[in-house]
Amino acid sequence: MGELGKLRLGVNIDHVATVRNARGGATPDPLRAAQIAQEAGADGITAHLREDRRHIQDADIEGLMEMLTVPLNFEMAATEEMQAIALRHKPHAVCIVPEKREERTTEGGLDVARDENRLAHYIAPLREAGSRVSIFIGAEEHQLNAAHRIGAQVVELHSGAYCDYYHEGRFDEADVELAKLREMTTYGHSLGLEMHVGHGLTYDTVGPVAAFPEVMELNIGHFLIGEAIFRGLATAMAEMRRLMDDARGV
Ligand code: PXP
């Protein structure tokens, strides 16, 4: 295998906010986590402002926009409220994710194919404002086709099923999911989409995904924040980075 390009690591800080919100105070501060992640070599910070604000809050997004020197990947549901917030902040990237059960595909990603017309109109102003638009979908050809047709520049494939099967010891099923991710990463790339992968990735599952030649970025949160409790965020990230680099031969 020839040398592949270095992968970008986006660090999702949502679950620092989950812990903070458990007590309703100011600590642990997700902005401090973002600062540490940025200094430790994160290529981007991902944060999901949920409609119910269960972790990240509006003020966190404002703070991130002010302090980050790496790109912010702003995850959001396709609602009018979120569109207005994204248009106000103009983050580097927006990633459209499902929040309600009926918006999801069987794979857990956004059902773009079912809502294609509305989403095409929805993302147009975001693109015009200069944000790169990413759509979080399952590894399904018709969803990739739909994401491409509506004008998304980036697609993030949902790796949750692969990771869940792997950690349940259901390795045959994990392999099936991994093969789908592999095939659809190639397919999406052939459509001209920039391919990202995320959700549920751990030290045990990251390598095979990082080795997909067409993948450009992984977004990883829950596992890294959990590991940071024991080892600190920079150390937890360094191990993830090493595994990603090893998989790519860089
Ligand atoms: N990518 C997207 C689009 C997500 O919604 C999430 C979870 O918020 C992640 C990546 C990160 O997933 P995890 O926290 O399981 O690593």
Image: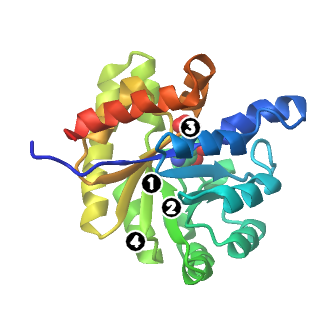
Q: Position of residue 143 (x, y in %)?
A: 42, 61
Q: Which mark is residue 234?
A: none
Residue 99 visible to an observer of this rendering = yes
Quarter of the image for the N terminus: give it.
Answer: top left
Judge the density around disc 4: few (<14), some (14-19), many (≥20) Cα neighbours within 10 Å. Answer: many
Disc 3: which residue: 221
Of 71 and 47, nearer the camera is 71
Q: Residue at x 69, y 51 (%)?
A: 100
Judge the density around disc 2: few (<14), some (14-19), many (≥20) Cα neighbours within 10 Å. Answer: many
Task: Name the amino acid type tagged 4.
Answer: His
Q: Which mark is residue 148?
A: 4
Task: Name the amino acid type tagged 2.
Answer: Ile
Q: Which mark is residue 135?
A: 2
Describe the colour scheme in one phrase.
Answer: rainbow
- Are the residues flagged by discs 4 and 2 in contact, CB closer than 8 Å? no
Disc 1: which residue: 156
Quarter of the image for the C terminus: give it.
Answer: top left
Q: Mark 1 near ligand 1 (CB under 8 Å)? A: yes
Kind of element beneath mark 4: helix
Vertical arrangement, residue 200 with respect to residue 64, above or below: above
Q: Quadrant of ligand 1?
A: top right
Q: Is residue 241 left or right of residue 220?
A: left
Q: Mark 3 near ligand 1 (CB under 8 Å)? A: yes
Q: Position of residue 70 (x, y in %)?
A: 53, 57
Judge the density around disc 1: few (<14), some (14-19), many (≥20) Cα neighbours within 10 Å. Answer: many
Whole-angstrom CA distance, mark 4 to mark 2, is 10 Å
Which is in the foreground here, disc 1 or disc 4? Answer: 1
